[in-house]
Amino acid sequence: MFLPARDAFSPEVRQNFRMSRRPEERVEVLGGAMDLVRPEEVFHFVAGRIAAREPAVIANHNLHSLYLIGKNARIAEFYQTSDLIEIDSTPLILWARIVGRASRRFHRCTYLDWRDAFWARAIEENWKVFFVGGAPGVAERAAARIQADWPGAQLATHHGYFDAAPDSPENQAVVEAINAYSPHIVLVGMGMPRQEIWVLENQARLGPCVTFTVGGAFDYEAGVQRSAPRWMGRAGLEWLFRLTADPRRLFSRYCVEPWHLLGPAVRDLARAAVRQAAAGKAPDAGHAERRQADALAGPDALGR
């Protein structure tokens, strides 16, 4: 078994809630770069950007997006220019652990996992949120549910069924609506790869806001789609729930696309083997270090 580098778990460097990413938190797995951060660390980063009136883009990686960056140059550019890249996949977190990265289950960041914490923080900080996405009427239903659950949430919406070409009148109207609202946070939920390309092409035209890509989050909020039980997400089985619910649309994503990641997976294993050999660890020492790593990465070590 490959092991994370010792300094990735050093108590001296694992300081809570900082504005800048630590070097060991940006890792490359299956051909894509991503950040090993917990939801509360993401929100702290967001709060800092909002306070400084600096824009930022928060992306997320899963196996589908890793497949797309190898097929679409615009998607690859989006991830290269994003400020923070969450991990939206328990299997991806487990694979990163296998190849020696310091990933843990609490590094999984999805809207449905941090929804309650997000809206509580938004109300506390008086953040204004604008959502773009969903079919006409869906975002309004989602907003009504959110505001029923979180009275005081400041939320405006626009559906995602518009001509997203940068110079189109419809796209210009959406950008103007967002800027007129002056949100602190923009949630873009138009599905991959449309939402990533839209953010890439329009972020610079928005005010100093933090933009998240959130996929079908508001479809779940509105009840248009059923979300998997959270225990399935934590167990790495959310893909199975979604596949059984919509096999025609998702068969290729879950049963074909992962095979295209076999090459990057082999490269991950090769790099991990090189790191392991360079470290020169004996098997017994390796088991001892993994136990130490588990202890240092636990809740107490991270201040939770």
Image (cartoon, grey):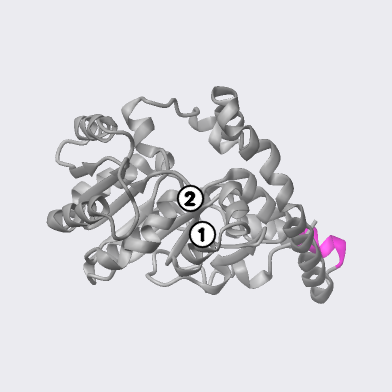
**Rounded to the nearest whole Å, what is the CA distance between mark 1 and mark 2?**
7 Å
In the image, farthest residue toward the bottom = 278
Q: Nearer the viewer, residue 89 or 301?
A: 89
Could you say where residue 156 lies in the image, as x and y percent from the top left?
Answer: 18, 44
- Residue 162, magenta (yes or no): no
Question: Is 33 situated left or right of 140 in this image?
Answer: right
Residues marked 1 and 2 touching at CB (< 8 Å): yes
Q: Is residue 51 visible?
A: yes
Callout 2, which amino acid? Pro
Question: Is 1 situated left or right of 141 in this image?
Answer: right
Picture residue at 32% right of the left edge, 42% below the top: 160
Question: Is 28 situated left or right of 185 in this image?
Answer: right
Callout 1, which amino acid? Ile
The N terminus, quarter of image: bottom right
Q: Of label 1 and label 2, which has the lower sequence position?
A: 1
Could you say where residue 102 lies in the image, as x and y percent from the top left?
Answer: 62, 60
Relative vertical location of residue 131 with respect to residue 197 in this rendering, above or below:
above
Label 2: element kind: loop
Q: Is residue 45 visible?
A: no
Disc sitting over residue 193 in the figure: 2
Question: Is 44 situated left or right of 286 in this image?
Answer: left
Circle 1 residue: 75
Q: Nearer the viewer, residue 127 or 81?
A: 81
Q: Nearer the viewer, residue 234 or 247?
A: 247
In the image, farthest residue toward the front = 168
Picture residue at 45% right of the left edge, 45% below the top: 110
The magenta segment is 282-288
